Image (cartoon, helix red, strand yellow):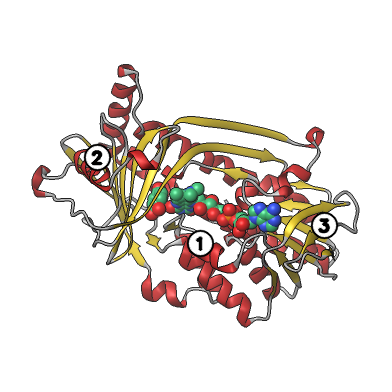
Amino acid sequence: MRTRVAIVGAGPAGLLLSHLLAAGGVESVIVESRTREYVEARIRAGILEHSTVDLFKSVGLDERLQREGDEHRGIYLQYPGERHHLDFVDLGAHTVWVYGQTEVTKDLGAAREAAGQQIVYEAANVALHDIETERPFLTYTDTGGSPQRLDADVIVGCDGSFGPSRAAVPQHARQTWERTYPFSWLGILADVAPSTDELIYAWHPDGFALHSMRSPQVSRLYVQVPNGTDVADWSDERIWAALATRLGDGENGWRLTPGPITEKSVLPMRSFVMAPMRHGRLFLAGDAAHIVPPTGAKGLNLAVADVALLAPALSALLTRNDPRPADEYSDRALRRVWRCTHFSWWMTSMLHTGEDPFDAQLQLAQLRWVTSSEAGAGGLAENYAGLPIGF
Ligand code: RFL
Ligand code: PHB
């Protein structure tokens, strides 16, 4: 089989890239190791930046988002005894949208299906070859167990943090930076109306807690737990009790309403960046090139920003023989990646508690500043709501 752009991975980055390429007249094929059902049910991100929503709008992907998404003007930041609302719009920034990654993936999947996009699901042993030449290709095994080959002009690795694309770049041609945090999140989905109108990020001596949501009937909440935590040690009662304490149930008349938990998982927290995001005819986008801890709600939005830059760059390369935007892709994308890596590290460092009482006082001092100074709040708002795609 032959195509112009071979995309590894049908997550948000891969699906959106194929959509944007098609709009620019460039054909692509996606090769994905999982089933479509698995990809669409994977519970992950929940917050879309303004520029992500604008991009979806500009390419006709916002019909259900407009109907079912929830536009938020800001977030609550709290520490014991105090809850502050940061209104991003009043602070000169933009609104954000609550719309689950599951829904983004379903909308993208439906749009690609309507356009007749070729997506190979359940491909095993995906491998990249000849990426330093102008004739790179993928090999994989199809569901019938037959070996297959996909020739292309360009390969794009959108295969997340564990896919084969990143590893296809030789060691001498890449640099990586990494930070592993000494805590994880235990996340739940619950069939209960959210107890808040906008997200609550809470600092507490017992550990961080976050109250998010997916719809008027479904809440998404997280508590900080030690690395290596086994979900089996956290009964539903224990989770709701920890959330009640950390989120301040009963304080200033606010109540947390518990409900049936439908999903529970532990997520380790990591920052990772690889540069450059290109080697020869292989380009990387999304989690394949960088990971951020979820505290800044940036991972999905960064994946979207990468492919928003990459799609026109590949169109220029493949349809006009203009290599310049493709040559500039990595540097331009990494500017934003490092900005978001810093913001995500900063939010994570400010909100997660550890052993050191000095660190705790610094965190509280920082939280008091961010919630009382317009300059402090404005910086958080600008970064959380997101910088323009071309930043
Ligand atoms: P994905 O979504 O991981 O998709 C990669 C795809 O590649 C496939 N794949 C392979 N295909 C072929 N061959 C192989 N060998 C393959 N290996 C893997 C995978 O099956 C998959 O389909 O990466 P992508 O597209 O770059 O998208 C990135 C986002 O998924 C990720 O950054 C976000 O989910 C991060 N994130 C959040 N981001 C936000 O912007 N806002 C949030 O509120 C937010 N919350 C979160 C998050 C991530 C979380 N977890 C679980 C890590 C909350 C959580 C809990
Ligand atoms: C979520 O709703 O899953 C979510 C929201 C905000 C974050 C992280 C996760 O910072």
Categorize mark 3 by other alpha carbons within 10 Å: few (<14), some (14-19), many (20+).
Answer: some
Regarding residue 332, the answer to whether it shows in the image is yes
Q: Amino acid at mark 2?
A: Ala
- Measured in 3D between alpha carbons, the distance from the residue under mark 2 to the one under mark 3, in whole angstroms, is 54 Å
Does residue 356 appear to the left or right of 255 in the view shown? right
Residue 298 visible: no
Horizontal relation, residue 82 to residue 136: left or right? left
**Frontmost residue, 191 versus 132:** 191
SS label for mark 1: helix
Check the image and report above or below for 391 versus 346: below
Mark 2 lies on residue: 242
Mark 2 residue CB less than 8 A from any atom of ligand 2 = no
The residue type indicated by label 1 comes to Thr
Relative depth, front residue between 358 and 266: 266
| Image position, residue 282 (x, y; %) | 78, 52
Residue at left 38%, top 76%? 67
- Residue identifier under label 1: 52
* Real-space Cα separation, disc 1 to disc 2, in angstroms: 33 Å
The three-letter amino acid code for the residue at tag 3 is Pro
Earlier sequence position, callout 3 versus callout 1: 1
| Sequence-wise first label, 2 or 3 | 2
Count of marks placed on residues: 3
Q: Nearer the viewer, residue 370 or 32?
A: 32
Establish whether ligand 1 lies closer than 8 Å to the Cβ of label 1.
Answer: yes
Residue at numbered disc 3? 323
Name the residue located 55 percent from the left edge and 63 percent from the top edge.
38
Image quadrant occupied by the N terminus: bottom right
Q: Residue 15 in the image: x percent, y percent?
A: 62, 66
Q: Is residue 118 above or below residue 215?
A: below
Seen in the picture, residue 154 relative to 378 is either above or below; the reply is below
